Amino acid sequence: MDGQQFRQWQALLELRTGVCISAERKVYLQTGLGTRMRALGIRDYQAYYQYVTEGISGAVEWSALVEWLTIRETSFMRHRPSFDCVARHLRARMSEGLDRPLQLWSVGCASGEEAYSLAIILEQLLSDSAIQRRDYGIWATDISQQALDQARRGCYPARRLGGLTDAEIHQWLEQQPDGQYQVAAALHERVCFTRLNILELAQAPIRDLDIIFCQNLLIYFRRWRRRELLNQLASRLAPGGVLVIGPGEIMDWNNPSLEPVADDRVQAYRRRESMECLE
Ligand SMILES: C[S@@+](CC[C@H](N)C(=O)[O-])C[C@H]1O[C@@H](n2cnc3c(N)ncnc32)[C@H](O)[C@@H]1O
């Protein structure tokens, strides 16, 4: 792949997904493209580019190619302090008297471990006798259909259980004869997995969220785009809702409707109840 071809593919991927592949990761791009080109018997990057960018068959091929170009590494409770922050925030909200059903959103959920981890946090919280039981739902969205298919199956190898304690594994997952772990129906029925490209947020009727959890997705995007998408996500929070991103994922961003959550271990922002306090 010569420099001009690399730039052409890099630009197409960024235009369609927001993901920006640096020159150091050219081999990663080549490997993904090569896999699809071999499957189709196409030997030339230019010919494949033409194929992917033209007509209906190009659109179909693009969906197959995206599966090879997305990084889907994830695990349960991947960054535990962020999940603890969600639990603390929701507990405080409920003790303040919030009594409607709760709505959460895992943006860039990959194969679902993050969304099910949020469900575990909610179940733990709502099992506290001091808290009044209420309904909740979790939206989980990703661009990768393969990741979403696995998420809906909810069956994982042991290495994905990551940050779960033994007690949590015992309570929320059941080991299968093949050694994989199946999430409990009580978690499964709470999560709605849907395909959504974050660049097409405007199409998603998901709003008034109590928690938006978006980690390890924006790191692949340019800084200006991270800021733009964070502003869009912020506008989907309910008053008092919290946006949680990965620690260090953005430094130079602030939004007047949000205030940072005071906790050095996490990067999270709470939507103000109203803008009056700014006046
Ligand atoms: C590294 S995984 C992060 C998974 C999980 N949030 C975590 O922190 O463990 C990044 C995910 O973002 C998804 N992704 C990449 N570009 C996307 C886009 N434009 N819209 C939606 N999801 C995207 C990938 O398919 C992948 O599943």
Image: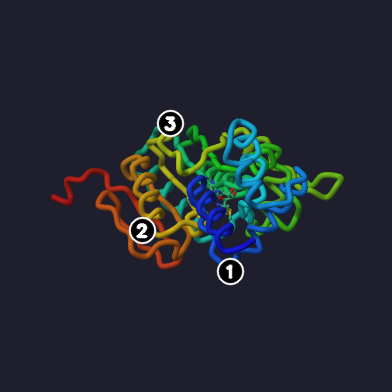
Residue at numbered disc 1 = 24
Rendered image: mark on residue 227: none
* Label 3 – label 1 distance at C-alpha: 37 Å
Q: Nearer the viewer, mark 2 or mark 1?
A: 1
- Work out whether mark 2 precedes mark 1 in sequence or the reverse, and give the earlier one: 1
Q: Nearer the viewer, residue 265 or 196?
A: 196
Q: What label sits on residue 261 in the rendered view? A: 2
Residue type of the residue flagged with mark 3: Pro
Hey, which quadrant is residue 248 in on the image?
A: bottom left
Q: Residue lying farthest left?
A: 279
**Which of the two discs, 3 and 2, sits closer to the camera?**
3
Question: Where in the figure is residue 179, as x and y percent of width and height?
Answer: 83, 50
Q: CA distance from mark 2 to mark 1?
A: 35 Å
Decide which of 92, 206 is in the foreground and name it. Answer: 206
| Side (left or right) of 80 relative to 147 | left
Vertical relation: 74 (above or below) 104: below
Asked whether residue 162 is in view, the answer is yes
- Please give left or right for residue 65 compared with residue 248 in the image: right
Residue at numbered disc 3: 205
Could you say whether the residue bearing mark 1 is in a helix, strand or loop? helix
Given this view, does label 3 or label 1 mark the residue nearer the observer?
1
Front residue of 121/27: it is 27
- Picture coordinates of residue 185 (x, y %)? 67, 35
